[in-house]
Image (tube, grey):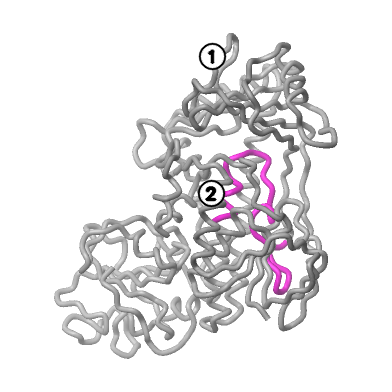
Amino acid sequence: MDDVMIVGAGAVGLMLAGELALAGSRPIVLDKRPEPSELPKANGLAGQIVELLGHRGLLGVLAEGSGFAGPAPGFPFGQVPLRFAGHDDMPLRLLLIQQPRLERLLTERAVRLGTEIRRGHEVLGLAQDEEGVTLELSTGRARARYVVGCDGGHSTVRALAGIGFPGTTDDEVLRLGHFACDELGPFQAPRVEGLEAGWNRTPAGRLLLTSLRPGVLIAGVRERGTLPGGPVTPDDFRAAVRRVIGRDLPLGEPIWLSGTVAQARLAERYRAGRVFLAGDAAHLFPAGGSALNVGLTEAANLAWKLAAVLLGRVPAGLLDTYEEERRPVAARSLAQTRAQAALERAPGEDGDALRELLAELFADEQPLRRLAALLHGSDARYPPARGLEHPHPLAGRFLPDLPLSTAAGEQRAAGLLRAGRPVLLDLRDDPAPSLSGGPGGGPDPRFPGEPGGGPDSVLPGGGWIDVVRARCAEPPADVLLVRPDGYVAWAGTGGLAEAARAWFGAGPAAVRASPA
């Protein structure tokens, strides 16, 4: 019996596979398509996932050839522009990368780490028992201890697991196209009289004109109605443009066309026994910019927990924290994307007045910073493990990228998570500090009641937690216990033993002493 089968070889499924393999598991990815998709359904990543990919050392290769990678200069919020230029330390991060290239690079990583990807295998049935899950496939039968559905908004895994997917479907159609337009650069649009870059509103609908990479125009048309059967053709697209703006546009040669209807949905559960959901299988957002951020960070959250259970490091009860942590994040993203969609749809002079007023409010730093954190995902704080409390403001938050001085030299805290293992970051500035006790090796009064008295003496066995001694100019706490997904499990002094056992299992101390 295999350990984990991931259904769906999209970005979320591939990210999950890579993270599982990094943590020591050997997942299998199943996909019903015989070949990878080349459709540029997404054009970039926005949010905390950009930071996490940096933690894993992947951001450099992903950003090669990108039109932009770094702090976002701005972002649309329901057709109201958020302008971050001139404000320091705005949290929202942006990486322009088309989805086919993202998926190719995530595939290469997952396979390099030991993942097997099987294409042309469609899931037809699912049954589970106390030991595992049996999948009936178009090619036969497969069995694994756990199954994760990353198979999109029409998830077969979700339906077969009996998980409801309540929500709403929009009454507008979006036709989206990429067109060859050699003279364009990123964030530009063709100069057409009476039209601007971004969304243009008319009584019949809205027209989008923008570009995210040189030579490619992105055009979109929103209007009330339903999508006809079959693919969107160039004639369909041109006709929609005429209906919305009353004239033809010189769009250029079409590269890719699609049609979609927005939905706002959230799975009733993220787990049914040994079956889990992630990505669009768990949620659909009615406005862009959040789906991959939420889905890919879900993959990082689930992967290390699932691998730790499969490798016998922690009890299976840790898997309950996946839904407890991630479903509220998705619910909040659903709420803000619903607000964006409503703001973008609001018609007439009333809608114009609402957008104009909010544009004034969003120009002020406090609401601008609040919205940037909301879009980024840095406003989320995970609850403590059951039976514990959050005594420190950093506990449950994403690890800040602290500048550190270690035995290996100067570095950033983010680099400590490249291996995908938990980290105990010891920032005490005692003279002659010892990881096995207090100054000079004696008991440390800040870690009482444990053999040796030092922070590493309370850690569980197995050798999978890296201990790093470092100095920091402004340490936020004496010691930080950081999860593989970049979140701080515990910070401070008292309570380290309980937190280590709750998140990483019980056992004698056996950690990897590491200078960096």
Q: Mark 2 falls on what kind of element?
A: helix
Would residue 424 appear left or right of 227 to someone viewing this image?
A: left
User: Residue 102, which numbered label?
Assistant: 2
Coordinates of residue 419 in the picture (x, y in percent)? 41, 67
Contact between labelled residues 1 and 2, with CB atoms less than 8 Å apart: no
Q: Earlier in the sequence, mark 2 or mark 1?
A: 2
In depth, the one of 381 and 14 nearer the eye is 14
Q: For mark 1, what is the residue?
A: 191
Direction top: furthest residue = 193
Residue range of the region highlighted in magenta in the rendering: 269-296
From the viewer's perspective, is residue 206 above or below residue 392?
A: above
Marker disc for residue 412? none
**Marks 2 and 1, how far apart in space?**
31 Å
In the depicted structure, whether residue 357 falls above or below residue 99: above
The three-letter code of the residue at mark 1 reads Arg
Image quadrant of residue 516?
bottom left
Q: Position of residue 424 (x, y in %)?
A: 35, 72
Spot occupied by residue 186 in the image (x, y as percentages of width and height): 47, 29
Residue 358 appearing in the image: no
Tally the numbered discs. Answer: 2
In reply to whether residue 283 is colored magenta, the answer given is yes
Residue 153 against residue 427 in the figure, above or below: above
Residue drawn at x 69%, y 16% as measured from the top left: 202
Drawn side of residue 373 relative to residue 428, left or right: right
Residue 368 in sight in this render: yes
Name the mark nearer the viewer: 2 or 1.
2
**Where's residue 141, x and y in %?**
78, 73
* Residue at point 77%, 52% (across, down): 154
Residue 471 relative to residue 60: left or right:
left
Residue type, mark 2 in image: Leu
